[in-house]
Image (spheres, helix red, strand yellow):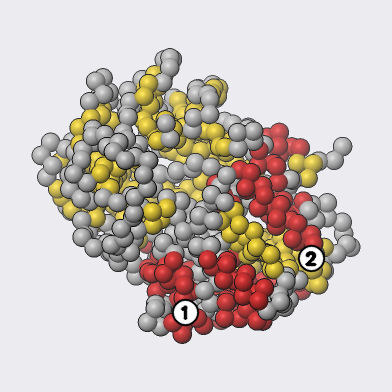
C-alpha cells in the first residue's frame, strides 16, 4: 500500500517536543511535549522525564493543564514549572521521587517567569503588580462586572495577542520561599523589570529594566547586576537597542548576554557578548560571523520552544544558536576566540541544552521532512541518539516531499537562496501548478524545517516555491538591511527572479497555473505582486498590509515600524502611499482571497477591509474571510479549528482557480 497524503487534519496527529532541560548532574533530563486535542479544540502540554543512562522516557504530568518552562532545582530533588491555574500561569513544584505536584504561587495576575535560586530554598519570580500595590495584595472586587473606560495617554497602549495593555501595571521581581510559601517583593517603583539570571553563589542577579519616563520612542533596556543583600546596582549594559538572555559562567566571573544595537533598527544582527567582572571589559564573540545569533526560522509546527540565548560549560565555553543560509545551528565559542558549528547543515535546532562538562547536548531538531524529535548528541564525535519518536509513525505513513535547495542571482548580483518542492506523487512528463509562498517579517527566514502548510500544498498536487529575498535573516547585514526604505523594490525583483529561474529550469511547472500567498510582510508582498503583474492566476493574502498611511496609526507597532521599514512617517504620506499596495488596486486583475484575524493588532483587520471594499467597488474578483477571536499568530498557534479552516480556505481558493 502507498503512503497517505498530508491533510489539514494532520495537525491533530503531529506532536511537538521542546524545552529540554538537563539535571545538574547530567544523568537525567526533562522536556515538554505538546499536541492538539481535537475534541477540546486546545493545545495540551505535558512534562516528560528521560533517564540518560538508559534513554528511558516517561510521562510525568497528565491532564489538560499546559506545562511550560520546566527547571530543575540545584540538588535535583524538585522540578518547578509554569502551568495554567484558574486561567493564570502559576509556579508548581513536583518532587522527582514521586507524588502530586504542589502549587507554589497564587499571584492575582499570574507569574510571567521564574528561576530557581541555586540555594534551593526559594524561587525568584517576575509578575505583574498594580501601581501602589505589592505582590501579596489582592484585587478589589468593587464594581467588578461593570465596564470601565480606558484612558490612553501613551502610544504603546495595545499589543497583539494581549489587546489593550493593562494600565498602571508593572512587572516586578521577588521570591517565594519553598517551605512556607511566603512572598517577598524585591524591586520597587513604576518600572518594568525582568529577571535574567542568578549567580551560582546566589549573591547577584542580572535584571533588565527601563526607567525612562516616556517609552513611546524608547526601545532600549538597561541591564544591571544587583547585589541580593544590599540591592547595590552595577550597570552591565546601557546602550540603545535590545540586550538580554544573560547567563553567569560557572565561576560567576563572566556574564554572557545576547544583544543588538539600533544601527539598522530591527534589522540589526544580534551578537553574543561576554562581560568580564574582573577587568570590566565587554567582548563581542560573534561579530566576525556576520549572521544573526538566535533562531530566525519561521514554521507552523513547533509549539512551546524557548531556547536559551547562551549556555555555559564549566570550562567557560559557550553554546548558542545561529541562523545562517536557511539553517539554525548550534555554535560553540571560547573566550579565546574559537568559533565553529557544533551541529550539521540542513536542519533546524529549535531548542537545546548543554551538559555542564560540555561533552554532550540535548537537541530538539527538525528538518524539512522531520517534524521534530529530541536527540542526545556527543559534541566530540557528532554521534546522535534519538530519545523520542513521537512523530515516527506519522513520518512512516505519510508521503512527505523533500525540498530541493536552489540559489540564483537577482538584480545587482545579489545571491538569493530558497527551496522548490515537487508535488507529492510527481510523475515525470506531467505538468503541475506552482504556489509561491512568501514569509513575514521581513527579518526572518524560511529554513530547513518542517512546514506543514507546504507539505499540504504539495499533497494537493502543487509545486511549492519559497525563497529568502533581501530583507530576510540568515544572511549578511547588508542583505537583511537592503529592504528598508525599498519595500516592493529589490525584494519584489528577488522574488520574481525566483519565479523566472524555476520556470526556466523546471519544465514540469505549468507557467499558466501560478499561485501566490503569504502573511504579514508576505501578505504585503502578495498584494504588491498582484498589483504589479498579472503573471499569477490566483492569490491569497493573509494578515496583510495594504495601506501604510493608516497602518501608521492603527498597528500596535505602526508609528515606529513605518519609519524603520518604509523610512517615512505621517509627515511624508507621499512615500507611505507610494509603497502601499492599495494605491495600485485598479491594476489588480488576479482573483484575490483575503484572510484576516479579527483581533490582529499587528496588522489590524482594517487593512483587509480597505483592500476588500476597494476591490469590490471596482468589480474585481475577491472574497474576504474573517477569523473571530484570532490574532496575528493564527497560522502558528491559533485556535486549532480556525487553523484548519484557514488551510481549507487556501486550498479551496487555489483549487477553484488553478
How many numbered marks does the figure carry?
A: 2
Q: Quadrant of residue 269?
A: bottom left
- Measured as percent of width and height from the top left, residue 42 is found at 57, 37
Which image quarter is the N terminus in?
top right
Q: Nearer the viewer, residue 352 or 78?
A: 78
Question: In this rendering, is residue 209 above or below 510?
Answer: above
Residue drawn at (62%, 75%), measured in percent from left and top? 614
Q: Can residue 257 be seen in the rendering of this structure?
A: no
Could you tell me how far apart the alpha carbons at marks 1 and 2 are, in whole angstroms?
32 Å
Residue drawn at (18%, 44%), measured in percent from left and top? 132
Q: Can residue 635 be seen in the rendering of this structure?
A: yes
Q: Residues within 10 Å of mark 2 (few under 14, many from 20)?
A: some
- Residue 54 is tagged as none
Q: Quadrant of residue 135?
A: top left
The residue where tag 2 is placed is: 657
- Measured as percent of width and height from the top left, residue 262 is found at 34, 67
Which image quarter is the C terminus in?
bottom right
Residue drawn at (75%, 57%), measured in percent from left and top? 652
Q: Is residue 201 shown left or right of residue 306?
A: left
Q: Quadrant of residue 615?
A: bottom right
- Measured as percent of width and height from the top left, residue 589 is found at 72, 77
The residue where tag 1 is placed is: 576
Q: Residues within 10 Å of mark 1 (few under 14, many from 20)?
A: many
Task: Tell whether label 2 touches label 1 (CB within 8 Å).
Answer: no
- Measured as percent of width and height from the top left, residue 328 is found at 52, 52
Say which label, 1 or 2, has the lower sequence index. Answer: 1
Element on which disc 2 rests: helix
Amino acid at each position: 500500500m502507498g503512503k497517505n497524503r498530508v491533510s489539514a487534519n494532520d495537525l491533530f496527529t503531529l506532536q511537538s517536543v521542546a524545552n529540554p532541560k538537563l539535571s545538574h548532574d547530567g544523568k537525567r533530563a526533562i522536556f515538554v511535549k505538546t499536541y492538539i486535542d481535537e475534541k477540546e479544540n486546545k493545545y495540551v502540554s505535558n512534562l516528560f522525564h528521560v533517564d540518560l543512562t538508559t534513554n528511558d522516557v516517561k510521562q510525568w504530568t497528565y491532564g489538560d493543564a499546559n506545562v511550560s518552562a520546566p527547571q530543575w532545582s540545584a540538588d535535583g530533588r524538585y522540578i518547578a514549572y509554569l502551568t495554567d491555574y484558574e486561567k493564570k500561569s502559576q509556579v508548581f513544584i513536583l518532587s522527582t521521587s514521586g507524588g502530586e505536584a504542589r502549587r507554589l504561587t497564587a499571584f492575582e495576575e499570574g507569574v510571567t517567569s521564574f528561576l530557581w535560586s541555586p540555594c534551593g530554598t526559594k524561587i525568584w519570580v517576575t509578575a505583574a503588580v498594580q501601581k501602589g500595590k505589592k505582590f501579596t495584595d489582592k484585587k478589589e472586587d468593587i464594581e467588578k462586572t461593570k465596564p470601565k473606560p480606558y484612558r490612553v495617554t501613551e502610544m504603546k497602549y495595545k499589543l497583539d495577542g494581549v489587546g489593550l495593555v493593562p494600565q498602571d501595571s508593572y512587572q516586578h521581581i521577588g521570591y517565594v520561599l519553598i517551605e512556607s510559601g511566603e512572598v517577598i517583593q524585591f524591586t520597587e517603583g513604576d518600572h518594568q523589570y525582568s529577571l535574567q539570571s542568578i549567580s551560582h553563589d546566589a549573591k547577584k542577579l542580572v535584571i533588565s529594566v527601563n526607567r525612562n519616563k516616556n517609552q513611546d520612542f524608547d526601545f532600549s533596556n538597561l541591564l544591571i547586576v544587583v547585589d541580593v543583600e544590599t540591592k547595590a546596582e552595577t550597570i552591565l549594559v546601557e546602550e540603545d537597542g535590545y540586550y538580554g538572555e544573560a547567563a553567569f559562567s560557572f565561576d560567576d566571573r563572566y556574564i554572557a548576554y545576547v544583544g543588538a544595537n539600533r544601527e539598522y533598527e530591527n534589522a540589526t544582527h544580534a551578537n553574543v557578548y561576554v562581560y568580564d567582572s574582573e577587568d570590566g571589559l565587554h567582548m563581542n564573540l560573534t561579530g566576525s560571523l556576520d549572521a544573526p545569533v538566535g533562531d530566525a526560522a519561521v514554521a507552523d509546527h513547533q509549539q512551546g520552544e524557548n531556547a536559551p540565548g547562551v549556555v555555559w560549560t564549566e570550562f567557560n565555553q559557550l553554546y548558542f544558536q545561529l541562523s545562517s543560509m536557511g539553517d539554525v545551528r548550534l555554535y560553540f565559542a571560547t573566550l579565546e576566540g574559537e568559533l565553529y558549528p557544533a551541529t550539521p547543515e540542513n536542519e533546524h535546532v529549535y531548542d537545546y541544552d548543554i551538559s555542564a562538562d560540555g561533552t554532550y547536548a540535548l537537541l530538539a531538531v527538525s528538518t524539512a521532512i522531520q517534524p521534530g524529535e529530541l536527540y542526545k548528541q556527543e559534541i566530540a564525535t557528532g554521534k546522535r541518539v534519538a530519545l523520542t519518536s513521537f512523530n515516527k509513525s506519522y513520518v512512516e505513513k505519510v508521503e512527505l516531499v523533500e525540498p530541493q535547495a536552489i540559489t540564483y542571482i537577482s538584480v545587482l548580483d545579489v545571491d538569493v537562496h530558497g527551496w522548490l518542492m515537487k508535488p507529492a506523487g510527481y510523475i515525470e512528463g506531467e505538468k503541475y501548478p506552482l504556489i509561491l509562498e512568501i514569509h513575514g517579517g521581513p527579518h526572518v527566514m524560511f529554513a530547513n524545517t518542517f512546514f506543514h502548510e507546504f507539505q499540504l500544498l504539495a499533497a494537493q498536487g502543487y509545486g511549492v516555491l519559497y525563497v529568502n529575498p533581501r530583507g530576510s535573516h540568515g544572511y549578511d547585514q547588508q542583505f537583511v538591511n537592503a529592504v528598508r526604505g525599498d519595500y516592493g523594490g529589490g525584494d519584489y525583483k528577488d522574488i520574481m527572479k525566483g519565479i523566472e529561474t524555476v520556470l526556466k529550469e523546471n519544465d514540469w511547472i505549468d507557467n499558466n497555473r501560478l499561485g501566490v500567498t503569504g502573511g504579514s510582510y508576505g501578505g504585503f508582498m502578495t498584494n504588491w505582486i498582484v498589483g504589479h503583474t498579472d503573471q499569477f492566476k490566483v492569490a491569497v493574502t493573509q494578515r496583510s498590509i495594504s495601506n501604510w498611511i493608516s497602518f501608521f496609526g492603527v498597528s500596535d507597532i505602526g508609528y515606529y515600524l513605518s519609519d524603520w521599514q518604509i523610512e517615512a512617517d505621517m509627515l511624508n504620506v507621499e512615500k507611505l502611499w507610494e509603497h502601499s499596495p492599495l494605491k495600485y488596486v485598479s491594476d489588480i486583475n488576479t482573483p484575490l482571497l483575503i484572510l484576516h484575524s479579527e483581533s490582529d493588532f499587528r496588522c489590524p483587520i482594517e487593512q483587509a477591509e480597505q483592500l476588500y471594499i476597494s476591490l469590490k467597488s471596482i468589480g474585481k474578483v475577491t472574497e474576504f474571510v474573517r477569523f473571530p477571536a484570532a490574532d496575528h499568530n493564527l497560522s502558528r498557534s491559533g485556535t486549532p479549528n480556525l487553523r484548519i479552516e484557514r488551510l481549507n480556505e487556501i486550498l479551496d481558493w487555489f483549487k477553484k482557480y488553478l
